[in-house]
Amino acid sequence: MSIYDQALDLGKEIARTEAYSNMQKSEQALLVDADARKAVQDFQNMQQSYYQKRMQGQELSEEDMNRLKDVEDKAMSFSPVKEYYEARMQFHDVVEKVNAKIQEGMTGKCQDHSCGGG
Protein backbone atom coordinates (compact mmCIF):
# COMPACT_ATOMS: atom_id res chain seq x y z
CA MET A 1 0.00 0.00 0.00
CA SER A 2 1.43 3.39 -1.00
CA ILE A 3 1.72 6.35 1.34
CA TYR A 4 -1.03 8.05 -0.68
CA ASP A 5 -3.36 5.11 -0.21
CA GLN A 6 -2.63 5.22 3.52
CA ALA A 7 -3.39 8.96 3.56
CA LEU A 8 -6.67 8.28 1.79
CA ASP A 9 -7.54 5.62 4.36
CA LEU A 10 -6.63 8.02 7.17
CA GLY A 11 -8.92 10.65 5.66
CA LYS A 12 -11.75 8.15 5.52
CA GLU A 13 -11.17 7.19 9.15
CA ILE A 14 -11.14 10.84 10.21
CA ALA A 15 -14.44 11.33 8.36
CA ARG A 16 -15.92 8.53 10.48
CA THR A 17 -15.09 10.22 13.78
CA GLU A 18 -17.81 11.59 15.99
CA ALA A 19 -16.02 14.96 16.01
CA TYR A 20 -16.23 15.20 12.21
CA SER A 21 -19.86 14.10 12.18
CA ASN A 22 -20.76 16.66 14.85
CA MET A 23 -18.99 19.40 12.93
CA GLN A 24 -20.85 18.52 9.72
CA LYS A 25 -24.23 18.45 11.49
CA SER A 26 -23.63 21.74 13.28
CA GLU A 27 -22.49 23.36 10.03
CA GLN A 28 -25.73 22.31 8.35
CA ALA A 29 -27.74 23.73 11.25
CA LEU A 30 -25.85 27.00 10.91
CA LEU A 31 -26.45 27.17 7.17
CA VAL A 32 -30.23 26.97 7.53
CA ASP A 33 -30.40 29.76 10.14
CA ALA A 34 -30.33 33.01 8.15
CA ASP A 35 -29.90 35.26 11.21
CA ALA A 36 -27.00 33.19 12.54
CA ARG A 37 -25.37 33.14 9.09
CA LYS A 38 -25.67 36.92 8.83
CA ALA A 39 -24.13 37.39 12.28
CA VAL A 40 -21.18 35.19 11.28
CA GLN A 41 -20.79 37.05 7.99
CA ASP A 42 -20.82 40.40 9.79
CA PHE A 43 -18.11 39.17 12.16
CA GLN A 44 -15.99 37.74 9.35
CA ASN A 45 -16.32 40.94 7.30
CA MET A 46 -15.23 43.09 10.23
CA GLN A 47 -12.41 40.69 11.08
CA GLN A 48 -11.19 40.82 7.46
CA SER A 49 -11.33 44.61 7.31
CA TYR A 50 -9.33 44.86 10.54
CA TYR A 51 -6.82 42.34 9.20
CA GLN A 52 -6.36 44.45 6.06
CA LYS A 53 -5.98 47.54 8.21
CA ARG A 54 -3.19 45.85 10.18
CA MET A 55 -1.49 44.62 6.98
CA GLN A 56 -1.38 48.25 5.85
CA GLY A 57 0.53 49.09 9.02
CA GLN A 58 -2.37 50.67 10.89
CA GLU A 59 -2.82 49.93 14.56
CA LEU A 60 -6.20 48.79 15.81
CA SER A 61 -7.63 51.03 18.48
CA GLU A 62 -9.19 49.80 21.68
CA GLU A 63 -12.50 50.92 20.21
CA ASP A 64 -11.87 48.72 17.14
CA MET A 65 -11.10 45.74 19.35
CA ASN A 66 -14.20 46.36 21.48
CA ARG A 67 -16.36 46.66 18.36
CA LEU A 68 -14.97 43.38 17.03
CA LYS A 69 -15.58 41.67 20.37
CA ASP A 70 -19.19 42.96 20.40
CA VAL A 71 -19.84 41.61 16.90
CA GLU A 72 -18.25 38.29 17.86
CA ASP A 73 -20.37 38.10 21.03
CA LYS A 74 -23.48 38.81 18.98
CA ALA A 75 -22.63 35.99 16.58
CA MET A 76 -21.87 33.60 19.43
CA SER A 77 -25.24 34.40 21.02
CA PHE A 78 -26.86 32.35 18.26
CA SER A 79 -27.06 28.73 19.34
CA PRO A 80 -26.10 27.29 15.91
CA VAL A 81 -23.00 29.51 15.79
CA LYS A 82 -21.85 28.49 19.24
CA GLU A 83 -22.50 24.81 18.55
CA TYR A 84 -20.60 24.98 15.25
CA TYR A 85 -17.68 26.75 16.89
CA GLU A 86 -17.49 24.14 19.67
CA ALA A 87 -17.75 21.27 17.18
CA ARG A 88 -15.00 22.81 15.06
CA MET A 89 -12.75 23.10 18.09
CA GLN A 90 -13.35 19.44 18.96
CA PHE A 91 -12.56 18.39 15.39
CA HIS A 92 -9.47 20.59 15.39
CA ASP A 93 -8.31 18.76 18.51
CA VAL A 94 -8.67 15.42 16.69
CA VAL A 95 -6.65 16.72 13.74
CA GLU A 96 -3.96 18.08 16.07
CA LYS A 97 -3.66 14.68 17.75
CA VAL A 98 -3.41 12.94 14.39
CA ASN A 99 -0.71 15.40 13.30
CA ALA A 100 1.18 14.80 16.55
CA LYS A 101 1.12 11.05 15.89
CA ILE A 102 2.39 11.62 12.34
CA GLN A 103 5.23 13.74 13.74
CA GLU A 104 5.97 11.07 16.32
CA GLY A 105 6.19 8.49 13.55
CA MET A 106 8.59 10.69 11.61
CA THR A 107 10.83 11.74 14.47
CA GLY A 108 10.37 9.00 17.04
CA LYS A 109 9.54 11.68 19.59
CA CYS A 110 6.19 12.05 21.29
CA GLN A 111 4.60 15.39 20.39
CA ASP A 112 1.38 15.42 22.37
CA HIS A 113 2.35 14.12 25.82
CA SER A 114 0.22 11.01 25.29
CA CYS A 115 3.15 8.63 25.50
CA GLY A 116 5.12 7.71 28.52
CA GLY A 117 2.42 6.66 30.93
CA GLY A 118 -0.80 7.56 29.57
Image (tube, rainbow, N blue to C red):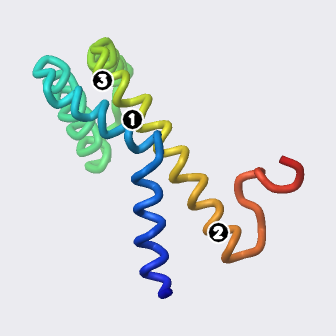
Residue 73 in the image, given as x and y percentages of width and height: 34, 15
The nearer-to-camera label among 3 and 1 is: 1
Q: Residue at x 50, y 37 (%)?
A: 90
Residue beneath disc 3: 81
Cα gap from disc 3 to disc 1, whole angstroms: 13 Å
Q: Position of residue 41 (x, y in %)?
A: 17, 30
Badge 1 amino acid: Asn
Seen in the picture, residue 39 relative to 109 is either above or below; the reply is: above
Q: Earlier in the sequence, mark 1 or mark 2?
A: 1
Question: Outermost residue toward the bottom?
Answer: 2
- Residue shown at 71% from the left, 53% from the top: 112
Q: Amino acid at mark 3?
A: Val
Q: Which residue is mark 2?
A: 103
Seen in the image, is 81 located left or right of residue 45? right
Of residues 61 and 29, the one nearer the viewer is 29
- Give the alpha-carbon distance from disc 1 to disc 2, as whole Å: 26 Å
Residue 83 seen in render:
yes
One can see residue 63 in this view: no
Q: Quadrant of residue 85?
A: top left
**Tag 1 residue:** 22
Q: Residues within 10 Å of mark 3 (few under 14, many from 20)?
A: many
Between disc 3 and disc 1, whose residue precedes? 1
Side of 7 relative to 110 (left or right):
left
In the drawing, does residue 78 fall left or right of residue 116? left
